[in-house]
Image: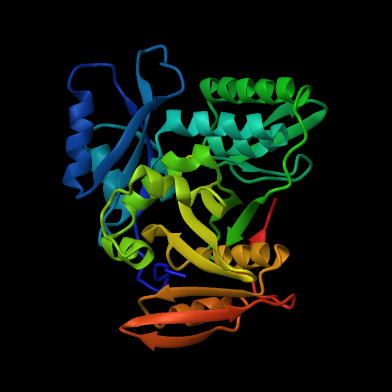
Amino acid sequence: MKTDSVYEEVEHVALWRVHVELEDRPGRLGELATAVGTAGCNIISLHMVGEPADDGSVTDELLVKVPEPVDASTLVEAVRQAGIPCTLLVRADATELSDPTTTALALARMVAADPGSAPRAVATMLRARLVDPAADADGHTHSLRVGAQRLRLGRAWPFTATELSRAAALLELAAQLALHSPARSQGVDRILLLRDGSEVRIRDAGPSDVPLVAALHARCSPEARRARFLNPAPRLAPGELDDLVSGQAVLAVTVDGGSAVGLANLDDERPGVARLAVLVENSWHGRGLGTALIRHAADSAAERGVIELVGTARYPGIAKLLRRAGLRPTAEILDGEVHLRAPLSDTLTATSGTLVG
């Protein structure tokens, strides 16, 4: 039950999505970067959205990291002082830092595995939300067709023709695959709403997830890696990675499928007893993800006839985490390590998230 602590303080990252109108002339992009830097902020990513206007100007979208003491209005004012119109300012989150191409490929993979996931995949790709076609909605909305079903998307800024063409391509892929899609496996594959409002997909891990798990391990802090693997090294041997995605392994990935953020493993210790281990990416601590993974692993173990979970941890707080997952552990400290035993029953009721799809 080697796991990382979910009680560590979560680092707050203030990210803002900014749209600016840039003239098509040399040096203008440099002036924008200077203005953002003058405000004490940092551009994380930048790309053009939409199509060039008749005068050649373009709308660029920036993800900007704004330090805690700096107000976002200071950023907008600095950009406007440089003579650059700012047309949008909305909050963003850390999941938007993923590479767009990688995200698009991951979404296509998700749709290929389950054509019915196309509406959520399109919403994720466009950084939008699904809204009721018959209800009033704030901000900008756009409707698309998924077979006989009408899909309505909403967000705080306008949709571009380029974005909508990408959405149409993904929906067309789903429609073609739906004609030939085999029955889905009965493994875990659910969307979980965590207590801070963020969502993750909980599903069974498999051999194709080795790159995702390797990246998850590398992003974790040395302390988290030591707690889980007794080794702070940022890389695991290929054989160790293969073991992590084989057997009973439950993976938590971002909704777009592009990044793994948590992993729970069950290994048979002896008849009726299984060893549990959990790893959660540091930036996802404190949201209830560790508790959710433990609960899903415990449910899976109970379905297989396991009557007790065991494990070893390096901090006493793990017992409290197990209790949050609905277990009743006992603990013994030996040589600085906490050895835990947690009987399983069919009366587990605690959850740390809500299923939304």
Q: Is residue 125 visible?
A: yes
Q: Residue furthest right?
A: 148
Among the 4 quarters of the image, the one containing residue 68: bottom left
**Residue that appears at 43% across and 60% down:** 280
**Does residue 353 appear in the picture of this structure?**
no
Q: Position of residue 28 (x, y in %)?
A: 21, 24
**Residue furthest out toward the front:** 270
Above or below for 210 versus 297 = above
Tell me: 2 left or right of 219: right
Q: Residue at x 35, y 68 (%)?
A: 227
Q: x and y percent of residue 353 in the render?
A: 61, 64
Q: Is residue 308 above or below residue 11?
A: below
* Left or right, residue 240 beside residue 146: left
Between 302 and 30, the one lying in front of the other is 302
Eyeballing the image, is 211 above or below 203? above
Here the colouring is rainbow
Q: Position of residue 109 (x, y in %)?
A: 58, 31
Query: Which residue shows up at 73% across the image and 35% down it?
Result: 116
Q: Quadrant of residue 142?
A: top right
Percent of width and height locating residue 335: 31, 84
The number of numbered badges drawn on the structure is 0
Between 33 and 94, the one nearer to me in the picture? 94
